[in-house]
Image (tube, rainbow, N blue to C red):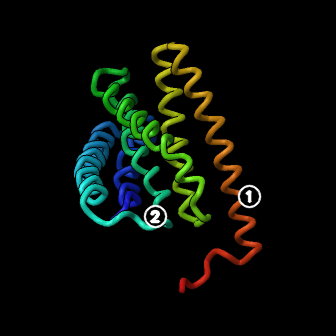
């Protein structure tokens, strides 16, 4: 059990982003609700696993960044559904921002990891919290969110560039997609 299990619920939560412009309001609410239900359920299971079981293996550690995606994408979808940032919207955004800050405090630990394809788990969540911060900036006009979103976008660009370089290097060196010992 690792945070990669959050990817299907995030798929549900993202439906309103495309569904609302196509006038699928009730369907968008349905998928959003299902995604949020599974996010809450899986979050409890993941935290239990992290607190009371053996540490995650090195290869799975980057998937911890996936914890950021459900509240960040949920915030984006929710603001589309209600057309404003209400208190629940703040809860979603702040949960995503808290998890981002929490994981960034562990940056030295993540930088020491050997490269695995699981490093790509850094990209989607960083993109999601970057977009969520842009939405906060657009809706609030707060300079803080403007700077935060710009900082997160620059971080995302650097991370994706690093991922591309490391993936190409690992591919050339035949260190990925090989059988484990």
Instruction: Name the side, left or right, on which 167 lies relative to 82.
Output: right
Q: Position of residue 26 (x, y in %)?
A: 27, 39
Instruction: Name the side, left or right, on which 159 lies relative to 125.
Output: right
Q: Residue at x 64, y 74 (%)?
A: 176
Q: Position of residue 89 (x, y in %)?
A: 33, 27
In depth, the one of 107 and 30 nearer the eye is 107
Point out which mark residue 60 bears.
2
User: Is disc 1 placed on a helix, strand or loop?
Assistant: helix
Point out which mark residue 165 bears.
1
Whether 48 is drawn above or below 101: the answer is below
Crowd class of label 1 (few under 14; some 14 to 19; many from 20; radius 10 Å): few
Structural distance between the alpha carbons of marks 2 and 1: 20 Å
Q: Evaluate if marks 2 and 1 touch, with contact meaning CB atoms under 8 Å apart.
A: no
Q: Position of residue 158 (x, y in %)?
A: 68, 44
Task: Give the position of the C terminus as an image quadrant.
Answer: bottom right
Dot 2 or dot 1, earlier in sequence: 2
* Foreground tag (2 vs 1): 2
Q: Residue at x 52, y 52 (%)?
A: 109
In depth, the one of 100 and 24 nearer the eye is 100
Whether 173 is drawn above or below 149: the answer is below
Q: Quadrant of residue 164?
A: bottom right
């Amino acid at each position: 059990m690792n945070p990669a299990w959050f990817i299907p619920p995030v798929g549900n939560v993202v439906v309103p982003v495309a569904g609302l412009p196509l006038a699928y309001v009730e369907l968008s609410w349905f998928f959003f609700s299902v995604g949020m239900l599974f996010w809450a359920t899986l979050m409890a299971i993941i935290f239990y696993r992290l607190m009371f079981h053996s540490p995650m293996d090195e290869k799975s550690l980057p998937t911890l960044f996936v914890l950021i995606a459900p509240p960040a994408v949920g915030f984006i979808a929710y603001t589309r559904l209600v057309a404003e940032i209400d208190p629940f919207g703040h809860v979603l955004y702040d949960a995503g921002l808290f998890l981002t800050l929490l994981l960034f405090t562990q940056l030295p630990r993540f930088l020491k990891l050997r490269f695995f394809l699981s490093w790509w788990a850094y990209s989607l969540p960083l993109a999601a919290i970057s977009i969520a911060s842009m939405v906060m900036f657009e809706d609030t006009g707060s300079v803080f969110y403007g700077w935060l979103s710009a900082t997160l976008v620059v971080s995302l660009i650097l991370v994706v560039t690093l991922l591309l370089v490391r993936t190409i290097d690992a591919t050339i060196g035949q260190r990925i997609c090989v059988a484990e010992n």
